[in-house]
Image (spheres, grey):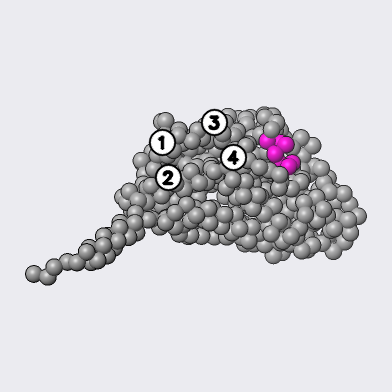
């Protein structure tokens, strides 16, 4: 029988310790749809900050397009091959996963760190909470109702930046006559719907918005103000370019950055693209909330869910990642890169540019804050509205009256 020396025993002990250490480290696959230049800089903040925490590693799975990424995530979870984390919007998109008990309950860490005390506004966390459990991490506050402008293009066209949609429709022909595209649009369903919603809140008000989406007020939906929304939306068709169909949102943003187009309707994530291009807010480009004489700020945003895993090491890493995403310093760095607002109000915003400051000012005014439509509608009902808006946009022969009639019908049966 061969005798084991002391040196061999030490070697075996070290090897065993290393094996245990390796087995406890986890690779955390994260599915998201942040693929543009500005978005990649933002998600890299999360990845780097997580990797700094220890042996666990962020494994990036980027899938272009929110609908595509959510679809892949749902298929994998329901198929038994769930990622460790996945991006969703703060909405009812992952409600089914909570009900089927497929998501990790983050309550222990949420209670320990006091999420409910520092996540603001107070109802921002609401989509994550069900039956006392916390099933997602809100990472930012995004607002959709912005027009981004190229200052030089408006100057060359000799027109002022619009304060209302009526203003925009008046100056758009002069912008085109000056050799520029008045409105850069990405012809995808979600972008068309975003533009429709921005017009809706821009020419109505908060009570109107809530009565339509929250209360499903069919009398209001079939009235003259809603018809004006459809007519204004349809009137924008003549002010885009022929290359719009299928265009990605960040490519449309680049048209404004490079001076090909005067303006783009897009959420505040567009700010990240201007920043990545080295442009200065309110010098090179403008950001107009609305346009509306009484601007509002939506409080939608992005959240991460953490599907249940069989590996305890992965679950431990998931909780670590959830905590990291709400860390005070990480929130400041991530949202500054992303163009969004932080979900906590105790972060350093000294680096905030002029556009971010506009958003922060609106956020402080409760009367200026509204919830996006998808917080009131199921994904199915919300999808039907988007399909209708897209069909109307891409079918010029379809009258605003006909589109409004179909809109009322969808709301009537929406849940």
Determine whether, in the image, residue 91 is placed left or right of residue 227: left
Q: Residues within 10 Å of mark 1 (few under 14, many from 20)?
A: few
Distance (Cα) linking label 4 and label 2: 18 Å
Distance (Cα) linking label 1 and label 2: 9 Å
**Mark toward the start of the polypeptide (1 vs 2):** 1
The secondary structure making up most of the magenta span is: helix
- Residue plotted at (23% across, 66% down): 8
- Residue plotted at (85% across, 64% down): 179
Disc number for residue 319: 2
Q: Is residue 292 visible?
A: yes
Disc number for residue 306: none
In the image, residue 37 above or below residue 107: below
Q: Which range of residues does the magenta coloring cover?
A: 357-363
Determine whether, in the image, residue 32 is placed left or right of residue 289: left
Q: What residue does disc 4 label?
A: 343
Foreground disc of the pair 4, 2 = 2
**Mark toward the start of the polypeptide (1 vs 3):** 1
- Residue plotted at (56% across, 34% down): 118
Do the residues bearing badges 3 and 4 touch, measured as CB atoms within 8 Å?
no
Which element type, helix, strand or loop, lies under badge 4? loop
Which one is nearer the viewer's eye here, 395 or 351? 351
Q: Position of residue 199 (x, y in %)?
A: 71, 43
Distance (Cα) linking label 3 and label 4: 11 Å
Q: What residue does disc 3 label?
A: 117
Q: Is residue 404 visible?
A: no
Q: Position of residue 39 (x, y in %)?
A: 60, 56
Q: Position of residue 173 (x, y in %)?
A: 85, 55
């Amino acid at each position: 029988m061969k005798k084991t020396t002391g040196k061999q025993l030490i070697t075996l002990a070290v090897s065993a310790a290393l094996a245990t250490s390796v087995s406890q480290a986890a690779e955390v696959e994260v599915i998201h749809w942040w693929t543009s230049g500005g978005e990649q800089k933002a998600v890299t903040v999360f990845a780097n900050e997580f990797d700094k925490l220890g042996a666990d590693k962020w494994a990036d799975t980027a899938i272009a397009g929110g609908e595509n990424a959510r679809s892949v995530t749902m298929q994998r979870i329901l198929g038994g091959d769930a990622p460790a984390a996945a991006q969703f919007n703060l909405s009812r998109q992952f409600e089914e996963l909570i009900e089927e008990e497929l998501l990790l309950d983050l309550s222990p860490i949420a209670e320990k760190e006091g999420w409910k005390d520092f996540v603001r506004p107070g109802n921002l966390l609401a989509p994550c909470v069900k039956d006392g459990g916390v099933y997602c991490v809100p990472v930012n506050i995004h607002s959709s109702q912005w027009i981004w402008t190229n200052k030089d293009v408006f100057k060359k066209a000799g027109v002022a930046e619009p304060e209302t949609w009526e203003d925009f429709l008046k100056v758009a022909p002069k912008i085109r006559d000056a050799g520029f595209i008045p409105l850069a649009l990405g012809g995808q369903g979600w972008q068309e719907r975003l533009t429709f919603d921005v017009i809706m809140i821009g020419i109505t008000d908060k009570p109107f918005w809530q009565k339509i989406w929250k209360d499903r007020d069919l009398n209001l939906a079939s009235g003259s103000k809603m018809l004006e929304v459809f007519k204004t939306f349809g009137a924008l068709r003549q002010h885009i370019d022929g290359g719009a169909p299928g265009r990605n949102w960040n490519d449309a943003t680049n048209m404004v950055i490079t001076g090909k187009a005067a303006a783009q309707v897009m959420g505040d994530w567009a700010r990240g693209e201007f920043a990545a291009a080295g442009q200065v807010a309110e010098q090179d480009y403008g950001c107009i909330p609305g346009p509306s004489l009484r601007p509002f700020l939506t409080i939608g945003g992005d959240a991460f869910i953490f599907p249940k895993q069989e590996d305890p090491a992965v679950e431990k890493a998931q909780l670590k990642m959830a905590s990291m995403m709400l860390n005070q310093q990480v929130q400041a760095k991530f949202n500054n890169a992303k163009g969004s607002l932080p979900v906590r109000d105790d972060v350093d915003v000294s680096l905030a540019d002029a556009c971010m400051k506009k958003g922060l000012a609106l956020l402080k005014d409760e009367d200026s804050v509204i919830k996006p439509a998808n917080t009131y509608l199921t994904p199915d009902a919300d999808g039907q509205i988007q399909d209708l808006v897209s069909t109307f946009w891409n079918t010029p022969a379809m009258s605003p009256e006909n589109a409004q009639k179909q809109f009322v019908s969808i709301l009537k049966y929406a849940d």
